[in-house]
Amino acid sequence: MDFTHDTEAALNSAAALVNTADSDGDRLADIAALDAFFTNYGWTGRHDHTESELRSVRALRPRLRTLWQSDEDAVVAIVNALLRDSHALPQLVRHDDEPYHLHATSADAPLATRMAVEAAMAFVDVVRSEELSRLQICEFPGCGNVLVDLSKNRSRRFCHAGCGNRAAVSAYRARKAAEAKGRAPS
Ligand SMILES: [Zn+2]
Ligand SMILES: [Zn+2]
């Protein structure tokens, strides 16, 4: 199963946005952090650099997170509500050397609105291709980050925040500890 490049980009961007609300500190703490996110995830169009923009983007995160934690019917209800609330109108557009892709809001709509609609449009594809199982929560204990498993063999279990490495290290330590215990005199 391959999603189109814009759907994959939108899913990764939505996951990254959700994951900025980290339990050990908000990684969208200020306008500079939002600026960095905007650049890193290839956002274009209106960007106000204001506290109110930052507030609305932060407020979108819990709503997007529920997309990872709901069954299909609930996901559909959220997606439809996001599209309805934003008066989404899908249009094929081309800009900044990107090939034609869908935008369902205009480039001058508020950033949080565009983020909501872009995520919703990507989830439309996920639901239609019956691939909701690609949306997972990181398995590393205590992490809770969301992830999008786009791997061919659905093998991704950990988020990009270093949990894969952490899991490998703890597995290694557990193995060493078990070996040391095995060697200890009884
Ligand atoms: Zn675009
Ligand atoms: Zn993780």
Image (cartoon, rainbow, N blue to C red):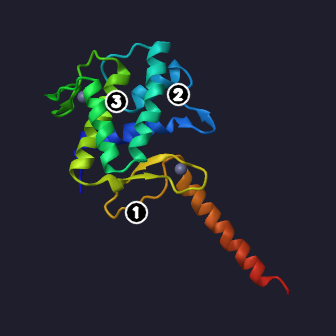
Residue 101 position within the rendered picture, expressed as x and y whole percent measured from the top left:
18, 34
Is the CB–ligand 2 distance for label 1 below 8 Å?
Answer: no
From the image, state whether disc 1 or disc 3 is nearer to you: 3
Query: The N terminus appears in which quarter of the rendering?
Result: bottom left
Does any portion of residue 150 appear in the rendered image?
Answer: no
* Label 1 with label 3: CB-CB less than 8 Å: no
- Badge 1 crowding class, 10 Å Cα cut-off, few under 14, some 14 to 19, many 20 or more, is few
Residue 158 position within the rendered picture, expressed as x and y whole percent measured from the top left:
49, 55
Query: What is the residue that sits farthest to the right in this orientation?
Result: 186
Which residue is the site of mark 3?
116
Residue type at mark 1 is Ser
Q: How far apart in space, not on screen, are marks 2 and 1 (Cα)?
A: 29 Å
69 vs 104, nearest the viewer: 69
Q: How far apart in space, not on screen, are marks 1 and 3 (Cα)?
A: 28 Å
- Secondary structure state at the residue bearing disc 1: loop
Q: Which mark is residue 28?
A: 2
Residue at 20 percent across and 25 percent down: it is 95
- Secondary structure state at the residue bearing disc 3: helix
Residue type at mark 2 is Leu
Q: How far apart in space, not on screen, are marks 3 and 2 (Cα)?
A: 16 Å
Residue type at mark 3 is Ala
Does any portion of residue 140 appear in the rendered image?
Answer: yes
- Secondary structure state at the residue bearing disc 2: loop
Q: Which mark is residue 155?
A: 1
Mark closest to the chain's N terminus, 2 or 1 = 2
Mark closest to the chain's N terminus, 1 or 3 = 3
Query: The C terminus appears in which quarter of the rendering?
Result: bottom right
Residue at 47 percent across and 14 percent down: it is 52
Residue 57 position within the rendered picture, expressed as x and y whole percent measured from the top left:
44, 24
